[in-house]
Amino acid sequence: MNRLLLVVLLAIVGGGLIAGFMVAGGPGYARMERYDNERAADLRTLGDYHRCLLEREEDSEGSNAPRYCSGFEQAPELTDPASGAPYRFTRLGPQAFKVCATFQTEALREASDRRYSQLVFEGDEGCVIYGQGTGAEAPDATLKWTTE
Amino acid sequence: MAVNKQLSRFVRDALSSGKTRAEISQALTDSGWSPSEVADALDAWAETRFSPPVPRPQATVSARDFFIYALTFGVMIFGAVYLVQLFHALIDLWLDTDSYRWPGRIRWSMAVLIVTTPVYLWLTLRERGKLADDPALYRSAIRRWLMYLTLLLSAAALLGDGVAVIYAFLSGDFTLQFFLKALVVAVIAGLIFLFYLADIRKGDAA
């Protein structure tokens, strides 16, 4: 009886660990997820920085810079955590841009349709997109942030 | 059960003076001792004609027992809590697709189980071997206390689980996700309860 119960408990632990590895992945996958989270944070920071640049371009005297722009006097020195390559910045129009990176896992892509996500995905590429683009390549419905 | 010192001394003196067990039992019952107290007091002395009376083995307490059994039961309870958490996280991932998928909870539970399971298994199998070699170890008071403590905790988990299920049912929140989580708690707590209940019975029989 006792031996059987011990075997059943061990089987449950073993099953849980196998399921855990299948769902959460191994150390390599965990590292890629961490890099992806860093990329997402970097893109948000760069998005804030470029948003402030646009604000400053509009207000050439710089006297009415929004409060959230303090600390963005210089461009943040951020690069892809895995490759060290710079993030891809594209101007979509006079008041629109996107900052993009290539993501390695599905985790953030799956979460991208949620309200708190600020990323828009197209394949492996995830972008922070700001403003209503006016150019031909500007997406129509990617206004994830709007000026208040 | 621990026997009252005065009672134990009385039984020893009575046996030494040649009184029979029936006479001692009658005297104690007439004085107001309950049948279980009388039986325990008499069971503390071996049924032999040897004089003075020969005490039966008593429960033992040692620092070594405390270390081994506190470690075994601590590791088991810690592992059981995270085994439940692991399955709850897996159920959430499977059924709650609206929440952000955060595998850190799964990885932490896995880390706890990868450490605690082999340690628990090694300590338990080692103890089983020692108990088989020397049944006197069944008399460890610390072992018995910790086993009863484990029974208490697993019974409390089962009761709490039952209350949560009824409450969720009455509140209209009895979802598949909730049912599976409650089932995980019931299965793990139930297996631990049965495992140590069987152990206690085996120890009593030894």
Image (cartoon, helix red, strand yellow):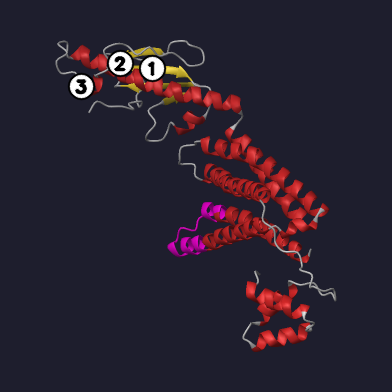
Q: Quadrant of the C terminus of chain B?
A: bottom right
Range covered by the magenta-colored residues: B163-181
Q: Residue furthest bottom?
A: B30
Q: Which residue position holds label 2?
A: A50
As measured in the structure, the alpha-carbon distance from the residue carrying label 1 to the one carrying label 2 is 9 Å
Q: Which residue position holds label 1?
A: A99
SS at circle 2 = helix
Q: Chain of mark 3?
A: A
Mark 1 vs 2: CB contact within 8 A: yes
Is A72 on the left or on the right of A124, as rendered? left
The amino acid type of the residue labelled 3 equals Pro
Q: Nearer the viewer, residue B182 or A127?
A: B182
As measured in the structure, the alpha-carbon distance from the residue carrying label 2 to the one carrying label 3 is 13 Å
Q: Position of residue A104 (x, y in %)?
A: 53, 22
What residue is shown at x 46% (from left), y 25% (from top)?
Answer: A37
Q: Chain of mark 2?
A: A
Q: Of marks 1 and 2, which one's residue comes earlier in the chain?
A: 2
> Mark 3 or 1, which is nearer the eye?
3
Residue A66 marker: 3
By secondary structure, the bulk of the magenta-drawn segment is best described as helix
> Mark 2 or 3, which is nearer the eye?
3
Can residue B121 be seen by looking at this rendering?
Answer: yes
